[in-house]
Image (cartoon, coloured by chain):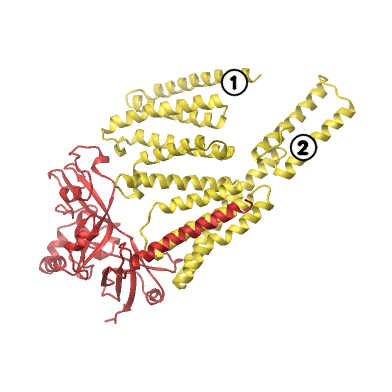
Chain colours: A yellow, B red
Amino acid sequence: MKPSSSKREAQRQADRILAFRQQLDELLRQGVLELSAEQRSRLDGHLEGRLRELAERFDVDLGDSQKRFSLGMHILSTLGGLAFCAALVLFFLRIWGSLATPLQVVLLVAAPLVLLPPIAFLARREKTAYYTSLLSLVAIAAFYMNMGVLGSLFNIVPTPGAFLAGGAFALILASAYRLRLPLVAGIFSLLIFLAGVATSATGAYWQGFLQRPENVLGASLVLLAAIPLLGRRLPAEFADTGRWIGLTLLFFSLLSLIHGGRVSYLPLDAGTVSSAYRLLAFATSGLTLALGIRRGDAGMMNLAAGFFALFLFDQLFSWWWDWMPKYLFCLIVGLIALALLHVFRKLRLRTREASL
Amino acid sequence: MKHAGWISGLALVVVTNALALWGVYQNRREGPVQTIELTERELPIAMRDPDDSSIRLRLAWRKSSCQFFPPPENCEYLFDRARLQDLGFDCSAAAGSDPGFRYPLRREAFVVLEYDGPRWQQHAEKGQSGSAAAEGGRPAPSGRESNRPRESLDGADPEGSRLFVADAGLSAETLRGKYPDARQYLIVRALIHAILEEPDDSRAAGSKPARWGGYVAQLLPPEIHVPPPFSRELASLETRRGGPPRYRVLLHFGSRTEPWIESVALLPTR
């Protein structure tokens, strides 16, 4: 059996072993397969040894109940991290006014720094990085607080550069310790930086980037283009997370441009901008769906199919809602949903036949 | 490579802070470029959370009456179309354009704030000669507007800020050449808001033609930090609107137009 290189791969192996063991029991019970006691004992020993090894090395979940516990622990570590971040910022605000400026600067710079060695220590000790992830979130918040408060202390005019630094810090922690939440924080920070710089390039103030969805659209395209460029240097789970965030932001910015053609940079009337982006929305969601099917990526397929359906119903709504009887509109939407179900069922059957 | 993660993080934090502090040093290296003494009228204490122990002051200036909702019928913008174009705004959109073109994104510029000068004199005289008329010319403040600090409202307000927007431009040096008196003319960074006001716009008066107008939406930085020991002197003072000033502040601006407080002196209460 191929050795696992990441927790995700290890979890997949453990799931396959557990499924295989269940299926084997079933086949033996039905008499389809017969194994001697010696063969069975050797097989069981091998499988148990492999599961034990995966559990010890990667802390994989062995069964559904363990998976539910893991999910709960992930949620708890996220909530705990956010609560610690809030506590840290509020504590600083509370004591802030009574400290001399040099002491304030020292404390601000020290806040993220003192957390780095414990993060490294925990990362070496933990198989599943609950506490590492939690402490990393606190370190990221401390670094943002560091930059924000230092800026207000010396009355510095805000720049998007703070998001570049914050994003880079989060990505360093994410890649060093394979952490998902800091990765998400890092990607969002870098997207804000990119969108802010793009807005500045037009001569407008950088914080206005949300008022022109094309800034977010451009930043999400940069992210989506960067993932294949980084190739194998990027861990698979990082590429998946990046792709998911990039596609979600891409589709949401297209949706807001469909409805807000007037807030586009394009020197065209709102109706033309809206129609152009509607076409682009169908094309990108359709292409993403096709790409997802080709790669066998269920996450990408579901996301693209969801947005394709959303764009479609949105289009139908804008065409027919006002002049068609409401019952007829709902009936047509229902029929289209049935047609889409039929198409997806055929696609599913085709992929099943390919895998047999 | 075992420690690469936390060492890279440490290096990034140190370099980022070093760059920020280098910028502060650059701003103050050659001493203040502008120095001005203002009172609480121009630098009121900014609203703060009860859990926040720091003190910040807000540079208050006289806003255009068009900034408030609903604006008075004869409201005047600070900048017309030509001046907005000088500031980099694309004012080519005609009446009836899509709102994206009618409300361009805010742009950063330098503005000249005149302190206790002819504009204030004119404003004060107008207030004395016909404060009732001036107040009567605009609807009575209600809702959120009634909560605004008094000095920000463009009416007869003898206790409000004496800072008036005199000019704006893209170069602080050019503006300083035009307004050399640093004790009366303060040059600060600001965000400029532009709008193409349509005749059928609810903000515009009935049958007026479409017009481009602009105003200062925000100064940068919006608030000025009060360092200790001055913060301790101001800590006992409550945020308030109007009334005689309770302190005066000596404010410096550096080469990057970033301000800092040199001193704060409490004024004797009357």
- Looking at marks 2 and 1 on the same chain, the residue that comes earlier in the sequence is marked by 2
The local secondary structure at tag 2 comes to helix
| Residue drawn at 50 percent across, 20 percent down | A338
**Residue A122 visible somewhere in the drawing:** yes
| Residue type, label 2 | Arg
Which residue type does callout 1 highlight? Thr
CA distance separating discs 2 and 1: 30 Å
- The crowding category of the residue bearing disc 1, from other C-alpha atoms within 10 Å (few below 14, some 14 to 19, many at least 20), is some
- Number of marks drawn: 2
Q: Position of residue A174 (x, y in %)?
A: 56, 47
Is any part of residue B45 visible from this angle? Answer: no
**Residue B258, numbered label:** none
Q: Residues within 10 Å of mark 2 (few under 14, many from 20)?
A: some
State which quarter of the image contains the C terminus of chain A.
top right
Q: Position of residue A355 (x, y in %)?
A: 64, 20
Q: Which residue is mark 2?
A: A50
Residue A338 located left or right of residue B256: right
Residue at the disc numbered 1: A351
Residue B218: x %, y % from top left? 29, 57
Query: How far from the left and from the top, in percent, is residue A300?
Result: 53, 31
